């Protein structure tokens, strides 16, 4: 009976440490500020400028899309 209780306590300590490590890792990742946050904060005009700067769209397409965005304001 005594040994069964000891194995129960041993298992509880393992659970405690695993939960603690998982919580710390999760908390650490949440405060990192990954690239996904940056992309979601970009305005439509910033995305358009970035795509133009990277050569994804040409000058004519940039002007057309910019006019549509400015018209919606």
Image (tube, rainbow, N blue to C red):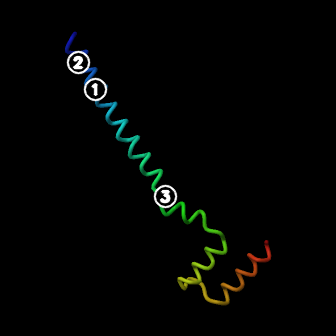
Q: Left of 33 or right of it: where is 22?
A: left
Cα–Cα span, label 1 and label 2: 9 Å
Residue 23, percent from left and from top: 41, 40
Which circle's residue, 1 or 3, is located before the other in the chain?
1
Dot 1: element: helix
Residue 65, percent from left and from top: 70, 80
Which circle's residue, 3 or 2, is located before the other in the chain?
2
Q: Which mark is residue 6?
A: 2
Residue at the disc numbered 3: 33
Residue 66, percent from left and from top: 71, 80
Cα–Cα span, label 3 and label 2: 43 Å
Residue at the disc numbered 1: 11
Residue 55, percent from left and from top: 54, 85
Q: Nearer the viewer, residue 58 or 41?
A: 41
Locate residue 13: give its quadrant.
top left
Dot 3: element: loop
Callout 3 crowding tier (Cα within 10 Å): few <14, some 14–19, many ≥20:
few
**Residue at (21, 11) in percent of width and height:** 2
Above or below — where is 33 with respect to 4?
A: below
Q: Nearer the viewer, mark 3 or mark 2?
A: 3
Which circle's residue, 1 or 2, is located before the other in the chain?
2
Locate residue 68: give its quadrant.
bottom right
**Residue at (29, 31) in percent of width and height:** 14
**Residue at (75, 81) in percent of width and height:** 67
Q: Left of 43 or right of it: where is 21?
A: left
Q: Nearer the viewer, mark 1 or mark 3?
A: 3
């Amino acid at each position: 009976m005594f040994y069964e209780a000891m194995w129960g306590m041993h298992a509880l300590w393992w659970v405690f440490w695993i939960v603690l490590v998982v919580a710390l890792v999760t908390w650490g990742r949440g405060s990192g500020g990954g690239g996904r946050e940056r992309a979601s904060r970009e305005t439509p005009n910033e995305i358009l400028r970035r795509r133009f700067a990277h050569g994804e769209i040409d000058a004519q397409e940039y002007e057309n899309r910019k006019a549509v965005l400015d018209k919606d304001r």
